[in-house]
C-alpha cells in the first residue's frame, strides 16, 4: 500500500467512533422497522449506551431532543405492562402489515413511483435491488423486498460495518468508495422517501412509541448526511466546498 493511501493515525479514533455510532443507530432503526419490539429488546434500548449518550449530550439539538423523547416512550411502554406491549404489536401490524391494508406501507416503491402504478417489484424496487447487487448485498429475508425501509437501513448498517473493517486495514480509497456510495444512496433513495414515511407514521399512528421513533429516524437521517460529509472530508483532507 502506498503512503498516499494510508490513513493518518490521528484520524483513526475519530473515524472509528463515528462509524460505530452510525452502525448502532442504523441497527436500531432497522430492527424496529422489521420486527415488533419484544420486552427484552425494549429493555436493551432503555440501557443502550449510544442512545443514552445522544439523549444527554449530543451537540445537535434536534437529534438530542428526539432521542430523549424516544427513550421516554420506550420507558412508558415498558411501564405499561403486557397490555400496552400487545397494543404496540397490534399497532405495528396496523401500520406496516395488515391484514387490512397497512396504514403506511414501508416500501420505497409506494412512495416514489409518482405518476406510475404503485405496486410491489416496480421500477424503484429494481433500482434498489440492482444497487444492492452492485455492492454484493443479497437479501436473505424473502418475507420482504429490497426496497423495504428496514432492508434499506440494513444496507446502510452493513456497509458502515464494512467501512469500519476497511479502516482497520488502513485502505483510504476503499473506505472513501464505501462512504461515497452510502452518501449517494442516502441522497437518492432514503432522503427521497423516509422523511415522508416518518411524517405519515407521526400523523397516523396511535402509539407514542412509533411516533417518537419516526421523529428520531427523520432527525438521524438529517444528521447522518452531515456525518457522512465529515467522514469523507476527513479522508480526502479537503474543505467543505469539495463535496
Image (cartoon, helix red, strand yellow):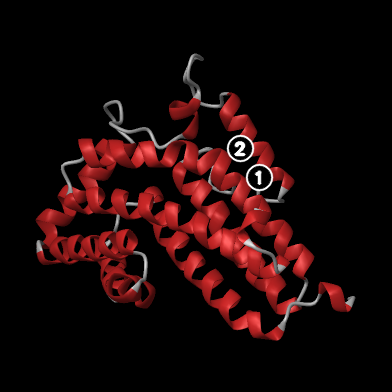
- Which quarter shows the N terminus? bottom right
Query: Which label was assigned to residue 170?
Result: none
Residue 128 numbered mark, or none: 2
Label 1 CA crowd tier, 10 Å (few <14, some 14–19, many 20+):
some
Residue drawn at 62 percent across, 46 percent down: 184
Image coordinates for residue 173, horizontal then vertical, percent: 78, 64
Residue denoted by label 1: 132
Element carrying mark 2: helix
For the point 70% across and 69% down, the residue is 237
Describe residue 184's horizontal placement relative to residue 50 as left or right: right
* Position of residue 69 measured from the top left corner of the image (x, y, whole percent): 21, 61
Q: Residue at x 38, y 74 (%)?
A: 50
Residue 46 at x, y = what percent?
26, 71
Q: Is residue 142 left or right of residue 168?
A: left
Tell me: residue 173, above or below residue 1: above
Query: Are the two marked residues, 2 and 1, in contact with CB atoms closer than 8 angstroms?
Result: yes
Q: Looking at the image, can residue 146 be seen?
A: no
Kindly tell me whether residue 98 is visible in this rendering. yes
Amino acid at each position: 500500500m502506498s503512503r498516499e493511501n494510508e490513513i493518518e493515525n490521528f484520524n483513526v479514533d475519530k473515524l472509528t467512533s463515528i462509524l460505530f455510532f452510525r452502525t448502532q443507530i442504523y441497527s436500531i432503526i432497522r430492527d424496529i422497522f422489521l420486527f415488533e419490539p419484544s420486552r427484552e429488546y425494549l429493555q436493551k434500548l432503555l440501557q443502550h449506551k449510544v442512545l443514552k449518550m445522544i439523549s444527554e449530550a449530543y451537540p445537535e439539538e434536534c437529534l438530542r431532543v428526539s432521542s430523549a423523547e424516544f427513550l421516554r416512550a420506550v420507558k412508558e411502554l415498558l411501564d405499561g405492562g403486557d397490555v400496552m406491549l400487545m397494543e404496540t404489536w397490534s399497532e405495528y401490524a396496523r401500520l406496516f402489515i395488515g391484514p387490512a391494508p397497512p396504514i403506511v406501507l414501508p416500501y420505497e416503491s409506494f412512495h416514489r413511483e409518482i405518476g406510475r402504478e404503485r405496486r410491489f417489484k416496480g421500477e424503484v424496487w429494481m433500482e434498489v435491488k440492482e444497487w444492492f447487487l452492485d455492492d454484493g448485498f443479497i437479501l436473505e429475508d424473502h418475507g420482504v423486498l429490497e426496497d423495504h425501509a428496514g432492508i434499506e437501513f440494513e444496507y446502510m448498517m452493513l456497509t458502515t460495518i464494512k467501512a469500519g473493517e476497511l479502516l482497520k486495514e488502513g485502505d483510504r480509497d476503499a473506505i472513501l468508495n464505501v462512504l461515497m456510495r452510502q452518501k449517494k444512496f442516502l441522497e437518492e433513495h432514503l432522503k427521497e422517501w423516509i422523511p415522508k414515511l416518518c411524517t405519515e407514521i407521526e400523523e397516523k399512528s396511535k402509539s407514542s412509541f412509533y411516533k417518537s421513533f419516526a421523529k428520531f429516524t427523520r432527525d438521524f437521517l438529517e444528521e447522518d448526511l452531515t456525518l457522512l460529509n465529515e467522514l469523507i472530508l476527513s479522508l480526502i483532507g479537503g474543505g467543505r466546498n469539495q463535496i
